[in-house]
Amino acid sequence: MTEPDDAKDDRICALIDDNLKRVYSDIVQEELPDRFKDLLAVLKAQDADKPGHGSKDPL
C-alpha cells in the first residue's frame, strides 16, 4: 500500500524542517571564528573613536 501524495509531501516537509532545525542549532552553538572576533573589535574601536558616540543629538 502506498501513501497518498499529500501525506508523503507532509512527511517530506517535516523531515526537511527537522534537518534544517538540527543544522541551525549546530551552527548557533559553534564559536565565532577569531577573524570575525578581530573584525568586530576593529569596528567597535572605530565606532568608539567617532565624535559624539554615545551621546544623543537634540532634535
Image (tube, helix red, strand yellow):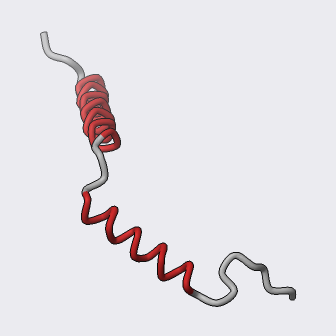
Which residue lies at the image location 69% right of the left edge and 86% below the top edge?
52
x and y percentages locating residue 6 in the rendered image: 30, 28
Picture mark count:
0
Q: Quadrant of residue 17?
A: top left
* Vertical position of residue 23 compared to residue 55: above or below: above
Between 2 and 38, the one lying in front of the other is 38
Q: Is residue 25 left or right of residue 12?
A: right
Above or below, comparing residue 41 to residue 23 in the picture: below
Quarter occupied by the C terminus: bottom right
Residues 18 and 9: in front is: 18
Query: Is 49 above or below relative to 21?
Result: below
Residue at x-position 32% and y-position 67%: 38
Quarter of the figure with residue 25: top left
Q: Residue furthest right?
A: 59
* Residue 35 coordinates in the image, percent (x, y): 25, 65
Q: Residue 9 versus residue 36: which sits nearer the camera?
A: 36
Residue 13 in the image: state x and y as whole percent: 29, 33
* 1 relative to 23 in the view: left or right: left
**Looking at this view, is 30 or 16 the one in front?**
30
The location of residue 51, given as percent across then percent down, is 64, 90
Q: Quadrant of the N terminus?
A: top left
Please state if 1 lies on the left or on the right of 16 as rendered: left
